[in-house]
Image (tube, grey):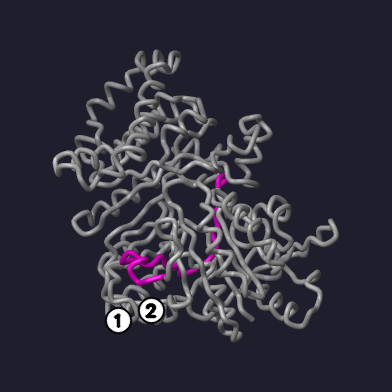
């Protein structure tokens, strides 16, 4: 069969759709992948000339697959609607389809819920043999205004049974400057996002993993499934040989350090001997240990991201994340021992309407207590459809319409998030402005002395009661973004170097 896979994810390292492609190719199907990434504006739709290119690339297909996040779902719907007149079967899969199949089935007649490797093979076999697809596990099928909801099949426990991720880029296309072009090595930007396992034992209320854990209750032997170190190393070696411009691998497992210590040591030993290239990974305060961090740094790990998300009270009561502030500080002390070799980023969530003023103040105080240096990443809360936090916000009247979930906003559109949530605006603005490099004297552009000055109790009370000044600052931030997009961007190259330097500081700090 001729199959076209379309990714609306925000980066072309979408490993999910690449794995589906490799599975299909192992069955001798011909597959092309189209990466339709917009990173600057999640609510932006594809222009007509791009949609025409998608139609031309897809028109001779026997099957079309499309995936999306919640934030890119409106664009997926746009593409599906344009492709429907071709009368080619279209299946919508990915994380959004998995946690929101009720929404997706309204726009697409076939929706894949859960992991799709085995399902896509059954689907192609049924189409080839002109058989019914109504009983294929994982599929929701709409026929004659009736929706058939099949249960999910058991998860694949042996991830090493999957073929290597598809990076045969001669069959790939990518959206670039409002035009779909052939995928080239330069589009990888010197990095590859790499998943070495699947699953997460946590059930954080804001995260899709809570839904996945419930979906697969009784359908798996274990929550966490890992590729073996041998499998990972072999695949990384092949990618390194194929792409000479690679400078590092970004391991994107939710928590790479959740692996047993001996597995990490085995991986690190082989990585150092056979790959010898810098890499990054994600971790969390529960699973950080000196033994693991030492092995990772010795193998070439130069960056780690540690998720804090909220203070202890918020994590436990709102996010259902069993994490203490003491664990955060203990993990911070461990990674700080390697500060000469290891860059550390801490993730926090802000603009949460369930937080009280003292919660945000305590978050800032915790960040001040963490040993420096580090980089602070401030992420604004999005209520993802069907997550426990989304359901609670809808029940409580915080979400009255789709836009209230903030899923159409870029995480870093700080002014819009603060205005939308419209609660604790003054404190959320301070925390957002703290993003960036944290040292003993400042957080990003914010001197520590200024932060302490802004957090004086009387000043907080006054600005929370009367948010006029906060709103004025937010308008200014929004206006500067508007200037950048409409005025500065087209003439940026012609600007004097001194102005470019100032402009970049404003752009990346604010």
Residue 341 sits in quarter: bottom left
Q: Is residue 202 magenta?
A: yes
Residue 474 sits in quarter: top left
Residue 14 horizontal/vertical position (percent): 48, 64
Residue 67 sits in quarter: bottom right
Q: Secondary structure at mark 2?
A: helix
Residue shown at 42%/53% (left/top)? 284
N-term mark: 1 or 2: 2
Residue 71 horizontal/vertical position (percent): 54, 48
Q: Quadrant where the C terminus lies? A: top left
Residue shown at 33%/73% (left/top)? 268
Residue shown at 66%/78% (left/top)? 121
Q: CA distance from mark 1 to mark 2?
A: 8 Å
Q: Quadrant where the N terminus lies? A: bottom right
Residue 295 horizontal/vertical position (percent): 30, 68
Q: Which residue is mark 1?
A: 274
Range of the magenta residues?
Answer: 183-206
Q: Which residue is mark 2?
A: 233
- Residue count near mark 2 (Cα–Cα under 10 Å), binned few <14, some 14–19, many ≥20: some
Q: Is residue 194 magenta?
A: yes
């Amino acid at each position: 069969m001729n199959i076209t896979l379309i990714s609306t994810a925000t980066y072309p390292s979408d490993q999910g759709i690449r794995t589906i492609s490799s599975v299909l190719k192992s069955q001798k199907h011909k597959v092309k992948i189209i990466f339709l990434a917009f990173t600057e504006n999640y609510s932006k739709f594809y222009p007509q000339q791009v949609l025409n290119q998608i139609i031309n690339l897809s028109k001779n297909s026997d099957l079309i697959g499309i995936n999306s996040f919640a934030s890119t779902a409106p664009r997926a719907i746009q593409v599906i609607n344009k492709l429907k007149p071709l009368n080619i079967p279209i299946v919508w899969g990915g994380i959004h389809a998995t946690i929101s199949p009720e929404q997706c089935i309204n726009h697409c007649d076939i929706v894949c819920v859960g992991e799709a490797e085995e399902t896509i093979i059954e689907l192609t076999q049924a189409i080839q043999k002109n058989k019914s697809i109504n009983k294929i596990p994982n599929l929701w099928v709409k026929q004659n205004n009736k929706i058939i909801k099949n249960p999910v099949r058991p998860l694949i426990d042996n991830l090493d049974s999957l073929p290597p991720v598809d990076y045969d880029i001669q069959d790939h296309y990518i959206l670039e400057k409002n035009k779909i072009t052939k995928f080239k090595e330069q589009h990888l930007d010197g990095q590859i996002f790499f998943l070495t396992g699947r699953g997460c034992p946590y059930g954080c209320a804001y995260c899709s993993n809570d839904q996945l854990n419930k979906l697969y209750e009784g359908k798996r032997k274990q929550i966490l499934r890992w590729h073996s170190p041998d499998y990972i190393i072999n695949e990384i070696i092949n990618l390194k040989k194929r792409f000479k411009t690679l400078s590092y691998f970004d391991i994107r497992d939710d928590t790479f350090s959740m692996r047993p210590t001996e597995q990490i040591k085995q991986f690190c030993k082989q990585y150092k001997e056979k790959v010898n290239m810098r890499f990054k990974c994600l971790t969390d305060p529960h699973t950080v240990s000196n033994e693991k961090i030492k092995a990772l740094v010795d193998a070439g790990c130069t960056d780690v991201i540690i998720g804090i998300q909220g203070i202890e009270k918020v994590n436990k009561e709102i996010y259902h994340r069993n994490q203490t502030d003491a664990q955060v500080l203990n993990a911070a002390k461990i990674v700080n021992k390697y500060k000469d070799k290891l860059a550390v980023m801490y993730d926090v969530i802000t603009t949460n309407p369930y937080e009280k003023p003292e919660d945000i103040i305590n978050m800032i105080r915790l960040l001040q207590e963490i040993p420096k240096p580090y980089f602070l990443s401030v992420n604004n809360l999005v209520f993802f459809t069907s997550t426990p936090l989304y359901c609670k916000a809808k029940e409580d009247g915080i979400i009255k319409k789709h836009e209230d979930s903030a899923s159409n906003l870029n995480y870093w559109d700080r002014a819009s998030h603060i205005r939308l949530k419209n609660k604790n605006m003054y404190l959320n603005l301070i925390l957002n402005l703290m993003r960036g490099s944290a040292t003993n004297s400042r957080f990003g552009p914010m001197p520590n002395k200024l932060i302490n000055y802004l957090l004086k109790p009387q000043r907080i009370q006054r600005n929370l009661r009367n948010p006029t000044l906060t709103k004025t600052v937010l308008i200014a931030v929004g206006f500067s973004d508007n200037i950048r997009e409409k005025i500065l961007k087209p003439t940026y190259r012609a600007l004097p170097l001194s102005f470019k330097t100032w402009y970049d500081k404003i752009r990346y700090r604010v």
